[in-house]
Image (cartoon, rainbow, N blue to C red):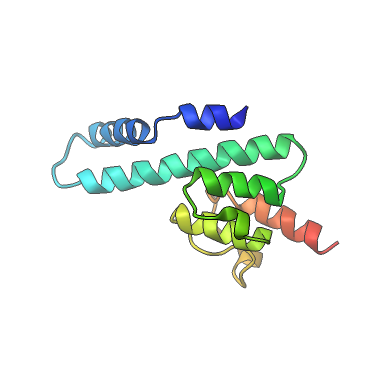
């Protein structure tokens, strides 16, 4: 079901419209078009990841299979070859232009308020340390 919703989202159109509204919000100031586009692209990836993570959480857990589905939807090559949650999450962070913080020395003192991985990171670390 989720894959049907994700496939129905037109990536280019979504990003294009979001970039337009970002430009409009700043009064169409010239020479900021690329910034608008890149920010809209990051917003799209964040929305896509959050959508999928929320569905996976409703199903009970964020599994390796669920992370592979997220990786595939982001265009990551051969997620089926990735064997660990760590490897998959790092690949997802790379694809979404997020800092590679998952399970790093910095993740214990995470201060990113808008990080979509913050709760998942802490939850997964707690589960893995049981």
Viewer can see residue 1: yes
Q: Is residue 126 above or below residue 5?
A: below
Please tell me which residue lies in front, 118 or 59.
Answer: 59
Point out residue 2 in the picture as x, y percentages from the top left corner: 60, 30
Residue 56 horizontal side relative to residue 8, left or right: right
- In the rendered image, the residue lying farthest to the left is 30
Residue 75 horizontal side relative to residue 41, left or right: right
Point out residue 88 in the picture as x, y percentages from the top left corner: 60, 57
Please tell me which residue lies in front, 2 or 77.
Answer: 77
Q: Is residue 79 above or below residue 39?
A: below
Please give the name of the residue rendered at 47% of the width and 26% of the height, measured from the top-left corner. Answer: 8
Please give the name of the residue rendered at 28% of the width and 43% of the height, measured from the top-left corner. Answer: 36
Q: Quadrant of the N terminus?
A: top right
Please give the name of the residue rendered at 57% of the width and 32% of the height, measured from the top-left corner. Answer: 3
Residue 19 horizontal side relative to residue 60, left or right: left
Q: Quadrant of the C terminus?
A: bottom right
**Which image quadrant is residue 84 in?**
bottom right
Q: Is residue 75 above or below residue 54?
A: below
Point out residue 75 in the picture as x, y percentages from the top left corner: 47, 48
- In the rendered image, the residue lying farthest to the bottom is 105
Please give the name of the residue rendered at 67% of the width and 58% of the height, measured from the top-left corner. Answer: 85
Point out residue 58 in the picture as x, y percentages from the top left corner: 72, 34
Q: Is residue 47 above or below residue 85?
A: above
């Amino acid at each position: 079901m989720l894959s049907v919703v994700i496939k129905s989202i037109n990536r280019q159109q979504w990003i294009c419209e979001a970039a337009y509204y970002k430009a409009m919000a700043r009064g169409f100031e010239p020479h900021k078009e690329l910034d608008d586009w890149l920010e809209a692209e990051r917003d799209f990836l964040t929305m896509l990841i959050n959508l999928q993570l929320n569905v996976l959480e409703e199903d009970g857990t964020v599994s390796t299979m669920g992370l592979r589905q997220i990786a595939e939807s982001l265009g990551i090559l051969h997620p089926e070859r990735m064997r660990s949650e760590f490897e998959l999450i790092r690949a997802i962070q790379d694809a979404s232009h997020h800092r590679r913080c998952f399970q790093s020395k910095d993740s214990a003192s995470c201060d990113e308020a808008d990080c979509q991985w913050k709760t998942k990171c802490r939850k997964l670390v707690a589960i893995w340390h049981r």
